[in-house]
Amino acid sequence: MAKNAGSKNTKIRRGAENVIMVCLALIVLVSGWKIYTIMRGYHEGQQVYKKISEQTAKNGFTGDIDWDKLRKINPDVVGWLYYKDTVIDYPIVQGEDNDRYLWTLFDGSVGGFGTLFADAATEAPFRQFNTIVYGHHMKDGSMFAPLKQLKSSDYAKEHPQLELITPEGKFHLVIWAFLNQPADSQIYVTNIHDKTEREEYLKLIEDLADYTTDVKVSADDRLVILSTCAYEYQDARYMVVGKMVPWKGQKINMSYAEPEDAETDADADADTEEGGGDE
């Protein structure tokens, strides 16, 4: 009887071991498939944006954008953002809401990279006091992941500006402030038309910022706030605030229209004056 019991226990043990081995094999297969799917998504997203970015320059970034070509791919395009020595070299869109481009690539395909997009509520992207641009913080280092480097004020000194190209013209986006804020931060507001409110907004940024640079900013300037996930605590966000400064030689009227004048102002691009252009 003892021998039969031992044999039975051995069979049970071996059966359990086989079940465990099968389970481990399934875990490995599922994990491998997930990793493959993620890597394939990264590759496909990178290829989409590589192909699109090839139209910006043949031999280095020049800021010369073929807007007609881009609009044929996606009529929602409103700008292009470039940051030297990083992977940031992407188009910016504005959708009807802030959900679509979280998971939609510039060419309309579905992908985790999404697309850089201006806040849907913004009345006149890059033509008013502040414009908020969102982008994913991808684990492969793409999209807005490089903004993490700007946690260091030393990095900001070494890389003091991005380049923002819009149908209106070419701009340096000179870094003024870096913030680490929750997703419900008071910074996430746009269409600020009252000058006193604009001044209060600048003061709020100064109060909340991890640091500000020596860049001079006033309520009459145009600001761009670049926002991405921070992963430092739940719903944390990195924000980089930059001041728009026209490239040298760019004749751009840097005033921005109030809501009632927006249509008239948009038609008056030809009536421009010399803009400041610090290199």
Image: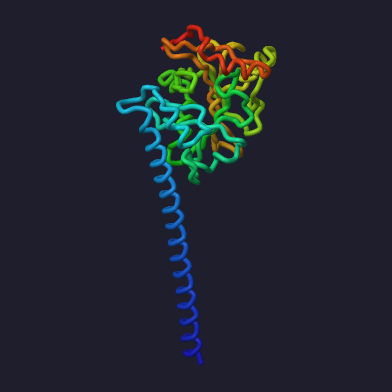
Where is residue 277, by image quadrant? Answer: top left
Residue extending furthest toward the bottom:
1
Up the image or down, 56 lies above or below 99; here it is: above
What is the x, y in percent for residue 210?
56, 23
Q: Quadrant of residue 32?
A: bottom left
Who's the residue at 48% across and 23% down the image? 166
Q: Position of residue 202 (x, y in %)?
A: 62, 16
Q: Residue at x 56, y 30 (%)?
A: 118
Locate residue 129 relative to residue 279 in the image: left or right. right
Report the label total.
0
At 38% from the left edge and 28% from the top edge, which residue is drawn?
A: 56
**Residue that extends furthest to the left in the rendered view of this protein:** 59
x and y percentages locating residue 170 in the rendered image:
45, 18
Q: For the C terminus, which image quadrant?
A: top left
Q: Is residue 108 above or below residue 237?
A: below
Q: Outermost residue toward the top?
A: 274
Between 259 and 50, the one lying in front of the other is 259
- Coloring basis for residues: rainbow
